[in-house]
Amino acid sequence: MRIGVSTFVTDQGVQPVPLGRALEERGFDSLFIAEHSHIPVERRTPYPGGGELPEIYYRTLDPFVTLSAIAAVTRSLLLGTGVALVAQRDPIITAREVASLDLVSGGRAVFGVGIGWNREEMENHGTDPATRGRLVNERLQAIIALWTKEKAEFHGEFVHFDPVYQWPKPVQRPHPPIYVGGGEGAFRRIAALGDAWLANSESPDALRPQIERLREVAGREVPVTVYAVPEDPDALEGYQRLGVERVLFYLPTVPEAETMTRLDAMARIAARFQ
């Protein structure tokens, strides 16, 4: 079982270059970073975590700028979005950003995607929350076409473009893996378009029936990465017994010195499973 880290990279916490170097030096497998383009001041949508929305949500750096900076100072660390909000992203630009990251990193990009929860945020991008699932499906299909075809075109309910050229193509073939975030509502999207499931933080016991259900829906074994797992050896053993491919420790967004101390503690636990 591989062990990586998920976090929010902001202007107030550790910066990308020292973070990337520290993760690779400590043997972590991957980094998945969150994305929010902005947070509306007037917001009706409740924070899924309960209570007030943490400030990190409206201070996130652009994920592809961040991961490109980290790519330049690392050699093996997988570089993932966790998650990119495809409902708020132009598919042609996003396809180029992911492919460019894959090129400059030597084939280490992981495209973690989700449909988002903040209705006011997506409405500011012209997205109707009621149809965001169908919109995300089409945009992912269009992105895959741009990655894999010399002359790509797409004609759907929401996405339309006649044949176009777009380079660079990704280094990975047929394209960078698509990790689909969400609960059971995402299983059909995983079956049709995904390469792995980016599961929410769940105990091993709670995750087991969900993995079984995912296999039923997808008709195949689907690799699973679990977000924000506890730094607890017993829990990690449970994920390992389940056959989970990767777990992600959650790294709080704090200054560099505090980050390094926290990563040292995480690395000591991770070393028992590597």
Image (tube, rainbow, N blue to C red):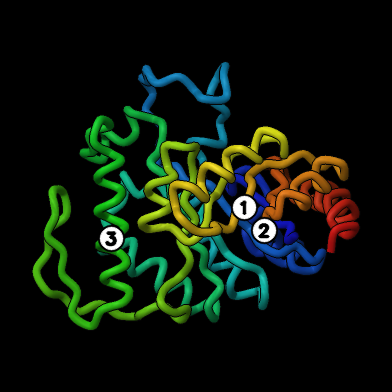
Please tell me which residue lies in front, 111 or 204: 204
Which circle's residue, 3 or 2, is located before the other in the chain? 3
Report the amino acid beneath label 3: Gln
Mark 3 vs mark 2: give the one in front: 2
Q: Are marks 1 and 3 in contact (CB under 8 Å)?
A: no
Quadrant in the picture for residue 199: top right
Q: Horizontal placement of 126 versus 274: left or right?
A: left
Q: Position of residue 108 (x, y in %)?
A: 56, 73
Residue 141 badge? 3
Determine the residue positioned at 30% across, 48% down: 136
Q: Are marks 2 and 1 in contact (CB under 8 Å)?
A: yes
Mark drawn on residue 225: 1
Q: Considering only vertical position in the picture, is 204 above or below 222?
A: above
State the residue at coordinates (22%, 33%): 128
For disc 2, the marked residue is 245
Which quadrant of the structure image shows residue 221?
A: bottom right
Secondary element type, mark 1: strand
Q: Secondary structure at mark 2?
A: loop
Mark nearer the N terminus (1 vs 3): 3
258 or 166: nearer the eye?
Answer: 166
Q: Is residue 11 left or right of residue 21?
A: left
* Residue drawn at 41 percent across, 32 percent down: 117
Q: Amino acid at mark 1?
A: Thr
